[in-house]
Amino acid sequence: MRGLIIFLATGGYTGYFPFAPGTVGSLVGVGIYVFLWFLLGEVPPRRIFPVSVYLLSLLALFFLTSWLAAEAERIFEQKDCRKIVIDEIVGYLVTMSFLPPRVEYVILGFICFRFFDILKPYPVGAFERKLGGGYAVVADDVMAGIYANIVLQVLLLFELF
């Protein structure tokens, strides 16, 4: 079980990348999104899953990744260890919620997500400081994903991109 937790929490060991492991982990999120896009035709597949199922899936993923992050912190014996990048993967998937599957949004989503994840504007950083364990590891990335998604939704609404 320990090996599986490390594999998942480190995004298939990409968390061991010597520099910018969070950025590399976010690229795994891009890969997962693009894989789902090609597999299902769109993400989320509106023809198959209603919005409520997609949101429930993201919520379940939040709890699963929070547990994995907490277990990985215990294994690595380090709070919010840089090797744990599953939070970046989930943050990117939140970023891409309810957007058209277009290359421009995939790229902009990555840039916006990394911007908010690194900058940690209020309350992103507050989530990280106030929550404990795996929830602290994942919540700030989910909030960064929400901020990035809002920016992309505005661009889409006003047809700016």
Image: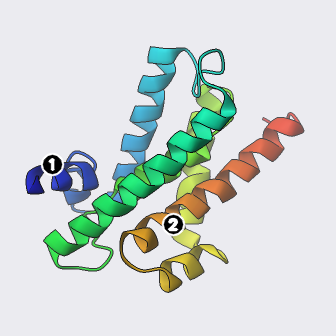
Residue 32 in view in this figure = yes
For the point 66% across and 36% down, the residue is 52
Seen from the viewer's position, the closer of residues 62 and 91 is 62
The image quarter containing residue 81 is: bottom left
For the point 68% across and 27% down, the residue is 100
Q: Which mark is residue 91?
A: none
Q: Which mark is residue 4?
A: 1
Dot placed on the residue nearer the N-terminal end, 2 or 1: 1
Circle 2 residue: 139
| Percent position of residue 32, x then y | 40, 34
Label 2 amino acid?
Answer: Ala
Residue 23 in view in this figure = no
* 43 horizontally vs 68: left or right: right
Q: For mark 2, give the secondary structure.
A: helix
**Dividing the image into 4 quarters, which one contains the C terminus?**
top right
Q: Is residue 158 above or below residue 62?
A: above
